[in-house]
């Protein structure tokens, strides 16, 4: 990897870490253990903007072939445990055992890797 590519990757990493997604303890623990490999978000303008900002969707709301780093936080308190996760994004139905409602499409964050914050 060239120095330019490393700088671009580092910059993308720093920018994407700004997206913090609070989740319930049950899901946080499952992600931390590696058991849960997807996290779901409703398809709505609130998430359109956030996912576009970190390069996971384009300006039309369509997923792009990119990876980004996000932070999953156990709840809303900034002092609570957090995990950095390298993710990709797709639009599809989720798994009910991981909190998705049957028959509903979501933004699906596929978790490729996690690191402690």
Image: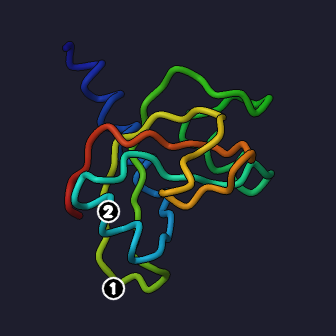
**Which residue is identified by label 2?**
30
Q: Which residue is mark 1?
A: 79
- The tag earlier along the polypeptide, 1 or 2, is 2
The local secondary structure at tag 2 comes to helix
Q: Which mark is residue 33?
A: none
* Left or right: 47 in relation to 64: right
- Are there few (<14), some (14-19), or many (20+) residues within 10 Å of tag 2? few
Q: Position of residue 40 (x, y in %)?
A: 57, 52
Quadrant the N terminus occupies: top left
Q: Residue at x 71, y 27 (%)?
A: 62
User: Within 10 angstroms of label 1, few (less than 14), some, or many (20 or more) residues?
Assistant: few
Residue drawn at point x = 54 percent, y = 35 percent: 89
Q: Residue at x 40, y 53 (%)?
A: 17
Q: Toward the viewer: 66 or 43?
A: 43
Determine whether, in the image, residue 47 is placed left or right of residue 71. Answer: right
Q: Position of residue 111 (x, y in %)?
A: 37, 42
* Residue 46, placed above or below residue 28: above
Residue 59 location, quadrant: top right
Q: Nearer the viewer, residue 113 or 50?
A: 113
| Residue in the image at 32% along x and 62% along y | 30
How far apart in space, not on screen, are marks 1 and 2 (Cα)? Answer: 19 Å
Q: For mark 1, give the secondary structure.
A: loop
- Using the rendered view, name the quadrant where residue 11 is placed: top left
Return the residue nearer the eye: 6 or 50: 50
Q: Position of residue 39 (x, y in %)?
A: 49, 52
68 vs 4: above or below: below
Tally of numbered tags:
2
Which quadrant of the figure contains the C terminus? bottom left
Q: Nearer the viewer, mark 1 or mark 2?
A: 2
């Amino acid at each position: 990897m060239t120095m330019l590519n490393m700088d671009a990757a580092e910059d993308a990493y720093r920018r994407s870490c700004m997206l913090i997604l609070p989740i319930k303890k049950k899901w946080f623990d499952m992600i931390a253990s590696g058991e849960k490999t997807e996290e779901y978000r409703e398809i709505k303008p609130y998430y359109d903007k956030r996912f576009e900002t970190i390069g996971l969707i384009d300006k039309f709301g369509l997923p792009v072939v990119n990876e980004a780093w996000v932070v999953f936080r156990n709840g809303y308190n900034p002092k609570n445990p957090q995990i950095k996760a390298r993710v990709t994004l797709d639009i599809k139905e989720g798994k009910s055992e991981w909190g998705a409602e049957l028959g509903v499409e979501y933004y699906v964050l596929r978790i490729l890797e996690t690191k402690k914050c």
